Structure formats: C-alpha cells, structure tokens
Image (spheres, rainbow, N blue to C red):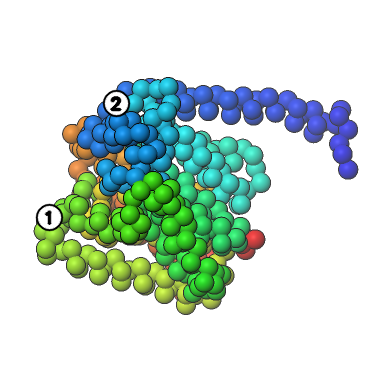
Amino acid sequence: MELDKHHPATLSRRRVEPVYWAMWGVGLSLAAILRISLFNFESPDYRYFLSPWYDYIVNNGGFRALGHRFSNYTPPYLYLLALATYLPLSKLYAIKLISVLFDFLLASVVLLAVRQRYDSRVVWMLSFFAALFAPTVFFNSALWGQCDVIYTAMLITSIYFVLRREPNLALFFFGVALSFKLQAIFLFPLFVVLLLKRHIPIYSFLIIPATYVLMMLPAWVAGRPLLGLLLIYRAQAGTYESLTLEAPNLYQWLPDNPELFRMPGLILAASLVYLLCLACYLSGVKLDEGIVIKLSLASVLLLPFTLPHMHERYFFAADVIAIIYAFYSPERFFIPILVGAASLFSYFPFLFDQAIFGLEYMAILMGIALVVVTVDLLSSLYPDLVTNSTPSAARGSMPMR
C-alpha cells in the first residue's frame, strides 16, 4: 500500500533525500579534487616505465604500436594506455586518469558487495566512500600512477558474482583480472574451495584461460606473436631477485638470501594454501556470504605474506577486501586499519625515499591481520571446535542467495 504524500514517513523521506544526495555530491567532488591535487607528482615508475611506454605508443602509430613488445606489462593495460594518448591532456595526467577512473569503479563494486549484506542506503554510501578514500587507493592511482586498482576492481566484481551465486561470471571477471596482473592469482584459493564444495563445475574453469586469450587477441591482431603473449608472466618471472621489495611480509625478518629462502618460501606458501583449502573442504558448514568474504581476505593476505619476491603494492587487493570484510564483520573494524596502514607506510621508501616506520614493524601489523582473519574464518568453519569464537563467527551470516 502506498503511503499518502502527507504521511509523516513520506514527509521525512522527502526531507532526507536532498541531504542524502548532497552528501553523495560533496563526497564525489572531494574525492576528485583530492586526486587531482596529487597529479603533478612523478614517481620513479612513471619516469622509467610508464612515460617511455606512452612515448613509444605516440611515436609508433598509436594503437599500431601494440604490435611491438616495448613493455613487460600485459596488453590489456597497454590498450588503455594507447587510448589515453588520444586524450587532450598532458602525458602525466592522461596516464593517471586511467587508474583514477577505475578508483570510482572499484568503489562501486565494493558498494555492490556490501549491498549483498545490507539494505541500508547509508551503509552502501559509507562502503563506497570507505573504498574511495582509502589512502592506498588514491596513493596507488593518483599519486603513484600505478594500475593495481584495475585488476582489483575486477577481483571485487568476481567476488560479487560469487556472492550472487553466478560462478561463470565470477570466473570471467577473475580471468579479466588475471589478464591485467598476475597478482590476481592471490584470490584463486577461493575458486579452488568453490570447486571442492561443488559450487563450480570443473569445466567452468575453462572460462579463465578463454578470457585471458580473448584479452590478448587485439595485440595478436596488431602483430605480436601469440605464444609470446601467452607466456608473458613466465617472462616476468625472475625479474627481481630480492626476497622482498618493501613488502610488509615475513621476509622482512629474514636475511635477503634468495638462494637459501626462495624454495622454502614457495613450499611454505603452497603448504599453507593447501591447508586453508583443506580446512574449508572438510568443514560441514555451508559457504555463506560471510565465509566467502573471510576466505577471500585470508587468501589475498596469506599469499603475498608468505611468497618471496613480493612488492609493497601486492597487498593492494587485501587493502580493499579488508574494507568489505569490516562491513561483514563490524566487530573487526580494525582489520582494514592494520592492513591499510601496513601497506601505506610500505609505499614510502620507494615513493619518497623515506621510511616513516620500519618495514619489519609493518610486517608485524600485516601478520596480526592475517592471524585474526584466519582464526575468524576457522571459527566460522568449525564453530563447535573453537571455544572462544565470537557470537558473530559462530552464528555466521545469511546463506548465499
């Protein structure tokens, strides 16, 4: 039954609506102004990589340049870079604009993921701006000029379709994310668990390589050898020898001796992922929305924390998924603070040649977050075996729709 236009609830809603939309307008404006204010900063990655790639595209026929191998990035980002060369903007601004636009897409899919849990428009707005104003988000795009936001937006979209129980779309967007950055693989344990729990048939995994190949086709048509395009990530392996490149992970506490620690590190990471997937498989608890978010965050924290040769930016997906996690588990609001702070301060040595805090201490923060999230996940999977589980962990959330 419709409410009368003079009904108190209708009148109250009419008073609130302008304020609600004004808050959206102010928030979006501030987010844009904040990013523009950072555009003039030139990072080392811009000077030594992004700027020369942009120049190569301009000097070699625009999109025709994509037929040449002039970058160690996969073609999908180079497609966007080529498109940016046609914009009436300075080189630095055009490059950064690519990532900044994806900041807003990222915030939108974070809102969609949170919307699966809440019906409140205020909560949706809070989740949107929590992602948009997360320091590592605007540092990564508007200040640094990096593009981690692109593959992360695709990963969050993939998680969103997992929550909606649309696995084929989830795998498609995971494939898109993987075509931009290999670091998308950090979320793959989620899909392994979904396979083991029979939420996804094994043949659906063909969507991932098919999507990757599809994303490479324009570069192949432009003239690049298909085999080389398919083996880009293999060629990238071994580019950096250090055990950690400012990443706040366990290698901050070990001597930088790759010959000694590389293989044990790989074995440790593989073993822990195996145990994580096994714990999820053996649990009789249904994979509800809350468990999906917890598993996603545990996965994107665990792998960059235990794998060698990680960069500081490789926790970017964890920075964002931690925000969604906090909305699903409000009592653990401190997790995105720990993860975001550890990531943010690990950026400083590279960007500003200055360490505000020792990276070994940032690794402790990241380690604490990993332990808390993992224990929370196990508490949800095995509520009867965890004596000190919190009420929300034992109770779980609504079943996946």
Figure check: 119 above or below 271: above
* Front one among 321 and 223: 223
Where's residue 266, x and y in %?
Answer: 24, 66
Mark 2, other Cα within 10 Å: few <14 / some 14–19 / many ≥20: some
Q: Secondary structure at mark 2?
A: loop
Q: Nearer the viewer, residue 60 or 329?
A: 60
Coordinates of residue 212 in the picture (x, y in percent): 43, 57
Q: Is residue 1 left or right of residue 203?
A: right
Q: CA distance from mark 1 to mark 2?
A: 31 Å
Residue at position x 12%, y 55% from top?
256
Mark before the other along the chain sequence, 1 or 2: 2
Q: Is residue 167 above or below residue 317?
A: below
The amino acid pointed to by label 2 is: Phe
377 sits to left or right of 303: right
Q: Residue drawn 11% across and 58% down? A: 257
Residue placed at 55% from the left, 24% from the top? Answer: 26
Residue 274 position in % (x across, y down): 36, 72
In the structure shown, which secondary structural element does the residue marked by tag 1 occupy? Answer: loop
For disc 2, the marked residue is 41
* Residue 76 in sight: yes
Please give the label number shown on residue 256: 1
Q: From the top left corner, tell me how far across and down residue 323 is, in percent.
A: 46, 46
Amino acid beneath label 1: Asp
Q: Is residue 174 visible?
A: no
What is the crowding at mark 1: few (fewer than 14 residues within 10 Å), some, or many (at least 20)? some
The reply to whether callout 1 and callout 2 are in contact (CB within 8 Å) is no
